[in-house]
Amino acid sequence: MEHRPPNQNFGPLLQPAALGDLEASIAVKVLAAGGDVAIVIDRDGVICDLAVGNSDLQLDDFESWVNKPWSDTVTQDSRPKVEEMLRDAASDKAIRWRELNHPSRRGDSVSLRYVAVGTGDDGRIIAIGRDHRAASVLQQRLLQAQQSMERDYARMRTSESRYRMLFQSTSEAVLIIDGSTRRVAEANPAADRLIGGDGSLVGKPFSRLFAVQNQEDAASLLSVAQASTSRAAPQTNLTSNGRQLNVSASLFRQDRSMHFLVRLVPAERSEPIAVDSNHRMLAAINLLPDGLVVTDRELNILTENSAFLDLVHLPTPEQANGETLTRFLGRPGVDRNILLENLVKYGVVRNFPTVLQTQFGELEDVEVCAVSVTEGEDGFYGFSIRRVTRREMERGQQPLELVRSPADMSELVGRVSLKEIVRDTTDFVERLCIEAALDLTGNNRASAAEILGVSRQSLYSKLHRFGIGNFEDDGQ
């Protein structure tokens, strides 16, 4: 068995007689099977022949490339790369892949990666190109996923910082109890002052924090909270350091583990406080997860809940009051005007898709419900703003072929550019015409191309792009 020496230039694996007098056009097609495009170029840089192995490429007519300089088929920024590749191939330098951009039918460019190889003394060069748009799309998706994870991580850190600040600054004594060990995992300063004495509470068994006669009741309180299906937290009276306390416990899960939130209130301050229904309503509104805003007729913010401040990243209500809502809500001149016109005309708007801009300029997709309230001569507006997740956005984007009425089209205006709407509409009509032509000709592609007034290659490209027909049978 013959072993080849480890040099830079390997000889051909086949003897010249093995291929016989193989025509140049057939040789180019064979090379195209290993890539998406194969081009034969003479010593002057002019294309002699070419073959395309991927009909999905959205380039201009390939037939027009023949007898043209290779540099004329690429964009201006890629021409120096073409000249360099031709020089390297002619001088038999090391093979190197280069990215070239070709103009496409849509006015943009399509990137292909090429390698150029010299063929011998006649000076001809063979260039093989591969379409790597799929890899570029995958890289873009990975980048978007990474950016989304980084944003989610930043939100988690912000939420944790707020929780820590509230946990440490509240005047109410609060303990976090580990659900498996029944020991104190965290205690705020108020709890340390109330029952901690001189030592730290963290790590101590929960029941041992109370008098001996109450330790069994303390353990039972956690068991009842774990088994309870009621929304109300179970509570009991326990004694610690000679002081009577009202103790309540609630179960919650965090990081796949179970914890208890225990509140400690001195008995002398644990009497229920009578509140009216309006106070309860306002308290519930302030704690809702959706942002709520009340403005005057000029859209100046009068009041808002905590969720709205979180959405726009404002630390205090004073920084929001008096500001115009248009600073944060909607795209100027597009959906903002539509929202206000419908609110004035109908008095109520439901599930209106738009964007919310934070004080740092970040944009988030939201849905808005709004109502106009008449009160005396002035009146006011109320807005409910809900963040829309990416899954809801994808589910809410209906394909263009389902848009059959002006009402359906109005949902796209403001969310999709006019250029994209026109492009998708053109593709939809083009697909209908192709399907009709195939139906009239009994799925004869040659006849269908003649009816439509396009070349067979162009028809095959469109069939592949729209996913129509059986691509294994290209003889029709």
Image (cartoon, grey):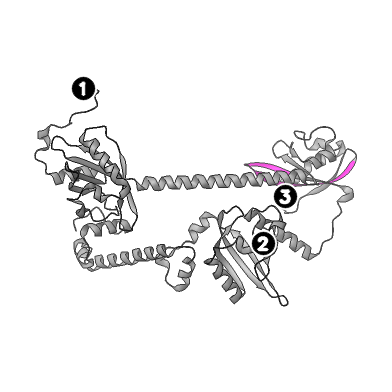
Q: Is residue 61 left or right of residue 22?
A: right
Q: Give the residue number, with chain letter if any, for mark 2.
A: 323
The C terminus: image quadrant = bottom left
The rendered magenta stretch, by its main secondary structure, is classed as: strand
| Label 1 close to label 2 by CB (< 8 Å) | no
Q: Is residue 106 left or right of residue 292?
A: left
- Crowding at dot 3, Cα within 10 Å, few <14 / some 14-19 / many 20+, comes out as some
Residue lying at 79% horizontally and 33% vertically, measured from the top left: 200
* Amino acid type assigned to the residue bearing label 2 in the image: Glu
Vertical side of 41 occupied by 319: above or below: below
Q: Give the residue number, with chain letter if any, for mark 3.
A: 228
Mark in the foreground, 2 or 3: 2
Which quadrant of the structure image shows residue 153? top right
Of residue 53 and residue 9, the one placed in the foreground of this image is: 9
Mark sitting on residue 3: 1
| Residue 351 within the segment the image draws in magenta | no
- Magenta residues? 243-260
| Label 2 close to label 3 by CB (< 8 Å) | no
